[in-house]
Amino acid sequence: MTLDWNAFTPWSALLGGLLIGLASAMFALLNGRIAGISGVLGGLLKPVRGDLAWRVAFIGGLVAAPLLYALFSTLPTVQIDAGTGALLAAGLLVGVGTRYGSGCTSGHGVCGLSRLSPRSLVATATFMAAGFATVFVLRHLLTA
């Protein structure tokens, strides 16, 4: 693996991380909820009265943000080096993993770790290790 130093943007990455942390903290302080995307989306599948508007706004913001960004700047080129079957299997496995792990990377990795949750530490370490192992197997053991 090589790092493209010409495309390395530490300041924008730092700013993005700060914005995510600030938004997550504000969401928890002002709404009393964890900004875990799988939980927010899951709540839309089984709606509860009075709990729908903020969930729709949250997911709507996730969809609208890149569209708004595209009005002022060029979106990065996306290159996916996997077939449709692999993407469907990956999506299914991620969905199942978030159910078994009681949360996703945003819920455990961002919000849970910042609250020093032991459960989130174990969950984050587990999905990071699974990701590392998957990349190693796919890139080094299954390729000729």
Image: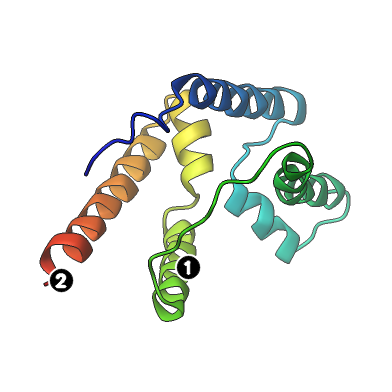
SS class, disc 1: helix
Residue sitting farthest toward the bottom: 85
Drawn side of residue 22 relative to residue 65, left or right: left
Residue matched to label 2: 142
Q: Is residue 52 above or below residue 6?
A: below
Quadrant holding the N terminus: top left
Q: Where, by quadrant of the figure, is residue 46 drawn?
A: bottom right
Residue drawn at x 36%, y 45% is 123
Q: Is residue 55 above or below residue 120?
A: below
Q: Where, by quadrant of the figure, is residue 68 drawn?
A: top right
Residue drawn at x 68%, y 36% is 33
Q: Please name whichever residue, 99 or 133, is drawn nearer the observer in this view of the structure.
A: 133
Q: Is residue 115 visible?
A: no
- Label 1, label 2: how far apart the Cα atoms are: 20 Å
Q: Position of residue 125 (x, y in %)?
A: 29, 41
Drawn side of residue 138 relative to residue 80, left or right: left
State how the image is colored: rainbow
Quadrant holding the C terminus: bottom left
Q: Position of residue 128 (x, y in %)?
A: 31, 45
Between label 1 and label 2, give the one nearer the viewer.
2
Q: Is residue 107 visible?
A: yes
Drawn side of residue 61 relative to residue 100, left or right: right
What kind of residue is marked 2? Leu
* Of pointers 1 and 2, the one earlier in the residue sequence: 1
What kind of residue is marked 1? Gly
Q: Residues within 10 Å of mark 2 (few under 14, many from 20)?
A: few
Q: Position of residue 138 (x, y in %)?
A: 22, 65
Q: Give the label on residue 91, or none.
A: 1
SS class, disc 2: loop
Q: Please name whichever residue, 17 or 118, is drawn nearer the observer in this view of the structure.
A: 17
Q: Please name whichever residue, 114 or 78, is drawn nearer the observer in this view of the structure.
A: 78
Residue drawn at x 42%, y 24% is 116
